[in-house]
Amino acid sequence: MRVEELMSKNVYWCRPDDGMDRAAQLMWDHDVGVIPVCTSDGATRVVGVITDRDIAMCALFRGKPLHEIQVQEGMSRELEVARPGDSASDAERVMRRAQVRRLPVVDERGALAGIVSLADLSREAASDRSSRTPDVSNSEVGDTLAAIVEPKRSESRV
């Protein structure tokens, strides 16, 4: 199965110069934990992502109200993406390697096309497909989740 068949297509996004209050409000209104950050030059090219945790930690350590902090101050710029034509197993491998639960899906110009999540892959793995074998297995999804929650080796913990 291809990513475009699994991904959410109606994705809310914000800009790097938006206040974090806008990103937080979008998350609250649409019950999501991540928002892609895109340019607003007409192409909606993905330049990062911001999570609810990024917002909370940035607000705590900046000591300012959310409307005084720009999204670019807390967004992740190291970005992994999927393409609409990628297989579900390709997306699962990227998530495992990058230790992320969600991947923005971008077209050939880098413009936002959707978002695919580990939950989307889990539903695909669990679905009863009598005519074919799912592209991703329950075991692979479990292994990916285990890899995601593993502490990153590059981080030092006190």
Image (tube, helix red, strand yellow):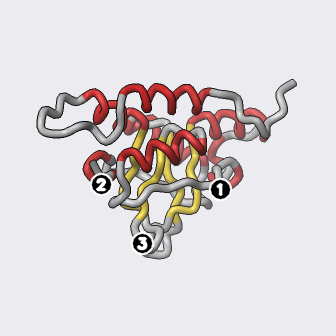
Q: Are marks 2 and 1 in contact (CB under 8 Å)?
A: no
Q: How far apart are marks 3 and 1 (CA)?
A: 19 Å
- The image quarter in which residue 136 lies: top left
Tag 1: Cα neighbours inside 10 Å, few (<14), some, or many (≥20)?
few
Q: Whole-percent x and y of residue 57?
A: 70, 34
- Closer to the chain start, of discs 3 and 1, is 1
Single out the mark in the foreground, 3 or 1: 3
Q: Which residue is drawn at 60% across and 46% down?
A: 20
Name the mark nearer the viewer: 2 or 1.
2
Q: Residue type at mark 2: give it.
A: Glu
Q: Which mark is residue 49?
A: none
Residue 105 x/y as whole percent: 42, 56
Marker disc for residue 108: 3
Mark pair 2, 1: CA separation: 23 Å
SS at mark 2? helix
- Compared with 126, 133 (above or below) is below
Secondary structure at numbered mark 3: loop
Residue in view at x 39 percent, y 37 percent: 29
On screen, residue 154 above or below 105: above
Q: How crowded is mark 2: few (under 14 residues within 10 Å), some or many (20 or more)?
A: many
Q: Which amino acid does label 3 sit on?
A: Glu
Residue, x 27% and y 48% (percent of image)?
A: 1
Disc 1 target residue: 77
Image height of 66 relative to 14, above or below: above
